[in-house]
Image (cartoon, coloured by chain):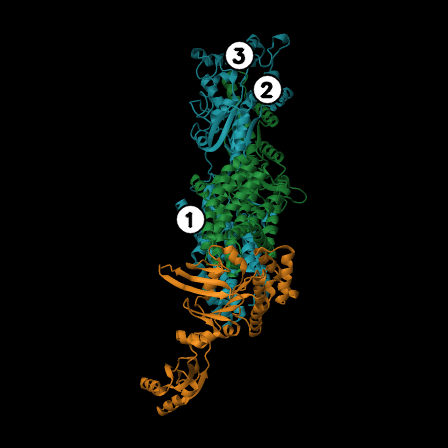
Chain colours: A orange, B green, C cyan
Amino acid sequence: MDTMVKLRDLSKTYRRSDGSAVEAVKQINLEIYKGEIFSLLGPNGAGKTTTISMMSGLIAPTGGDAFIGGHSITKEPMAAKRLMGFIPQEVALYPELSARRNLLFFGKMYGMHGSDLNKRVDEVLAFIDLTDRQKDKISTFSGGMKRRVNIGVGLLHRPELLFMDEPTVGIDPQNRRRVLDTVKQLRDEYGMTILYTTHMMEEAQELSDRVGIIDHGELIALGTQGELTQQVREEDQIDFAIDGRGWSSELEARLLQEVPGLTRVAYAPPGHGDDSAGEESLAALTAFAARGRQALPDIIRILNDAGVEVHSVKVREPDLEAVFLALTGRALRD
Amino acid sequence: MRAIIDIALNDLRIFFSQRGNWISLIVLPLAFTAFLGWAMGREFGSTQVRLDVADLDGGPAAAGLINRLAASSDVIILCPHENDADNVCHLDNGETALTTEQGINRVQRGRSDALLVIPAGYGQAVQTGASAQLDYYSLEDPTQPSPILQTVNAVLQKVNSAVVAQQMDMAMLEALVGTDAGSPLADEKTRTAMAASLQEDAQRLLDSQPDLVIFKSTAPMETSSLDQGFGQAIPGMGTLFVMFTVLGGMVTLLRERRQWTLQRLAVAPLRRSQILGGKVLSYFSLGMIQFLVLFGMGAVMGVNLGGAPLALLAVMTAFVLCVTALTFALAPRMKSEQQAGGLSRLLALTLAPLGGAWWPLSITPPFMQTIGHLSPVAWAMDGFQTLIYNGGGLPDVLTEIGVLLAAAGVLFAIGAATFRVGE
Amino acid sequence: MRKIWAIVSKEVYITFTNRNLLLIMLVTPLVLSTIIGLAFGGLGGGDSGGLSLSNIPIVIVNLDEGATFGNALGGGFTADNQTGGGQAFNGGDQIVAILAPNLAEGQNAFGASGDQPVCSLLPEKGADNSRRYSGTLEELFAPALMDDPAAARAAVDRGDYAAAIIIPPAFSQAVTPQFQFGPADDQATNAAAETDVVDSEVEVYANAGQPIEASVTRSVVEAIVGQLVRFNVAITAMGQAIGQQIAASPMDLGDVDPATVPAQGAPLADWLAFMEANADRSPWFAGLAAGLTRFQAAASGDQSAAGGAANNDLGGIVSCLFDPNFEPIQVQQQPLNRVQEQGIFQQIMVQIGAAQAVFFALFTGIFGVLSIYEERKNWTLQRLLASPTSRSSILAGKLGGNVVVVWVQLALLMLFLTLVTSAIMRSPVNIWGDQWGLILLTTVALSLAVSGLGVLVVGLARTPEQVQAMGPVIAIFLGALGGAFGFALPDALANLSLITWGVGAFKSLAAGQGDIWLNLAVLFGQGALFFVIGVWLFRRRVEI
């Protein structure tokens, strides 16, 4: 498979005013292949936007380099930038200008002009379904329409590579659906390579050919969805909501000892964890077992024996959320 | 280059897509210059001023003085003497003579512009050469010379000349021929007749005396009080307008970063220098448009703008470049649009008056003139003055242009080094 | 109401804790007013007024060839630098001597320096020398001399000098007395004067860029030339008057051969001979012949023949012509009110200070209202809207806060202006008068008008960016009309600006007059109108 993007030890360190350093991005290495949708998944503040900003040449890396189609973004920025389209998280448009004027202007900034540019603007307007509103000012558009123009600008020069930085943040489900469909359409019909950053596990799951998981500026996992879930494949995750009053470390030891295949138990006391809302004394117990469904009866029996009331049980198939949880011990949306 | 121009054109298109910006860049400055031109074009004579005269002497000499005053100026209406059927004097009861108290009261109420009191004994003083003091009351603007007082002084100078000539002639004759018996001046009657004759002759000679001082200037100069300072109103107000417009670019830059259009430019295959160049060009153009609108309208209204339009353009260009450079040197240090707006107003409202855009620097003490030249406005005003009033050409303003360009160079270097798009 | 007040005090607090804002609201207008006040009013509170100009660069070109006046009287007062008994006269040298005493060659008779006779006709002789040109003129001008008029004009063109004073070759000719015995012959006199006029005028060639310096130079030159003309007129009038008296006195010239009557401008000796020969025909002939003989003897240094003080008397009398103190009729500006009594510096601080205060307050008004947009951006406005506070209260609080901020700014500026004036005049003064109620009313009216204008401007603009651009231009516009800058516009235009009305009211109050009801009505009216239209527009733009 041809490589479209290659990151080599890409790093960004900010200096605080007190002299201390903040490593926003720590030596990321990864490759993105031609024609794939690659998702960079991570919670807010993980370093996704910093990474994509360095890759697009918006900010300079403090270490390492990014190669776009073989061109170094630091040494041959023009050649690299010509290959890529960029769709920022914000609606980066001139509110005073019409949709068409915005497209024309940014098209010129990519070196397009004349009838070629005009034709292309028509195509893009048709693609984002705004041909009838093209003469209206952006300031009169709804949020979803602005998003579409925002995407349209990134597509103007038929880039081989498209960077999309959290394009669904803050929009309603209907428009979000539309964005996701567009992303797939761009890959399937136009063969574009797409780097998509998100903190939404479902989006990454739906779209991605491959996923990179980023946390605290570090790339902690990389691969296809299958490869990633493989890492937690042997273990199913069983979530219990229990009455925390009977819980003890002796009970934990007994569970691990007596239940075959049980590898790990995580206990969150009442008031913590998202399941406890509403019922005050409920604690969350998460158990990881090689064969979850087989282990389940044993666990429930031991808990009953100990007088711990089980309120609900959920067995979860491994997904990216589970991968993130397994890798960091935290939920993605914390 | 093409990208630079495209960026600048796009910025200008955005700027002019807002009606409010048309008003601030074109409409109000045009109106301002038109008002100014209109006010300057008006004959001062069309505005009459009323001078009350309280004649406490009542003699023929005082009457003569009033006649002279009346004849000396069409602008000044002597009240009540020159009152007409329309009561141009705004007299309350059609008085034919005013007392000092009435006059003061009228001046205070704005019924007349000034009061001149001819004291009792004026005629005696004119006869004998004794001192007499006329009192003048007015609420005129102390920062502007008073045309009424100037006229009164001019008339009095001739009266004084006649008195002095008569006094001196009499004294001289008495010294020459003596006043002893046998002398032609021994007779009191002859002396009186002689004195009267001397004063009459002197007065007549003075009246027929042609003006021996002619006043010329390098450029048409409005000398009436109304127009003092008008001469620099267009360049002065022009620089002030331009500073507001161009320094306002700081706010726009921050806004572009907030709405991410600047970042969008940064990820396009453009060099940083192209983006910077485009932005610089757009604010520079706005400044130049503002200047050209003001000066152009001034030219249409017949305001004197000197004879070297190209050199004028060069000074404008250097000044706008300097202010643009200042904008870009400061913009990276701004944290919010609010802060940038405040700083642009502070700079415009201090650099302009400090540099002599409101009042000529020459009226301030030397150290203020030195401090004032820290402001680019001072150099621009120097240049405009040389070109508009000193009949200078390009070679005469090279220093000013050089200083402005050098400052622009340094500031641009700072701006280019600190100009950030993404971070 | 308590909520409104809470918003108001928040506005005031935020504004007056912002250092940048304080600079532009208070420091800049204060410093500016003081500089201009000092420039126009000079230090202290003297009533001399005028600009504190000094060292005006001027260049003098003296081409005057001088003139000889054929008659006798010159000798008494141009004794030193003349040859041949003081017959020659050079008016150009006189002008140079007065304007540039340090550059003048040799000693001149009635210039600034030397021990020329003191005018003997002055009521109080030499008591007051303050009006003499010497001293004051030395500070006023920084003169230079040139030979070439073209070069001098070019130097003025370049801006090297504020003015050139070019004295033509025939200047002395034009001011030389037409001494003639005999009946007045106006036509001859005038004709002579008019033919000379073209090349006898002193030219003041000024740089139009320095109008103030130019007009000062012009009036000084006019005064000096006026003195010289005065001499001319005196001598001529004397000749004419004597002629008339001789004609009127009993005499008999019937058998005198007309050919023996000396021509006009004939040497003194001829006249003397004629008068002596005909002394019995007229008492004037006898008297003049005797007097002139005595005088001539004195001029030539023969004291014994001079018969005492005649010479000195004559010199003292003639010097009166050139004595600036000898201006019997004078006009003196009298103070019309409290402020004028205090002198020009205080007057200017009132006028310029008030104009600057209102002008800078306009910015506070406009950009204070604009802060509603800022609040919306920072989401504090939404937070307010979400609270159980009515929309009217929020708007009333924001706008009321703006009015209060403007009022505090005006009040502080007025206080500081008074303090600065007191400090500079070294005595405590309250420059605004003591009609506290009306002063308060005026500041309130101004705050309303200024703040109302802010609401109107913000309401008219569509976006905060437009306010950023439009606000200053509107403020400058009103400032220019209202005389906040260095020029005054005709009343018809000036009255369009609320600054004019405000400054007018402050000037009246400072002058101790209370008749400012029209001003107050205009300001309150404008304020109300602006507020109504502005709030209406504003509510259409901003959901509040």
Q: Secondary structure at mark 3?
A: helix
Q: Report whether C72 appears left or right of A122.
A: left
| 3 and 1 marks on the same chain | yes
Give the CA separation, mark 2 to mark 3. Answer: 17 Å
**Identity of the residue drawn at 52% across and 74% down:** A206
Bin the neighbour count of mark 1 within 10 Å (Cα to Cα): few under 14, some 14-19, many 20 and up: some
Chain containing mark 2: C
Q: CA distance from mark 3 to mark 1?
A: 69 Å
Above or below: residue C116 compared with residue A58? above
Q: Secondary structure at mark 1?
A: helix
Q: Which of the two residues, B35 or C66, is positioned nearer the viewer here? A: B35
- Observer-side mark, 3 or 1, equals 1
Question: Looking at the image, is A333 positioned above or below residue B37?
Answer: below
Q: Nearer the viewer, residue B231 or A74?
A: A74
Q: Which residue is mark 2?
A: C240
Look at label 1 and name its amino acid.
Val
Identify the disc placed on residue C289: 3
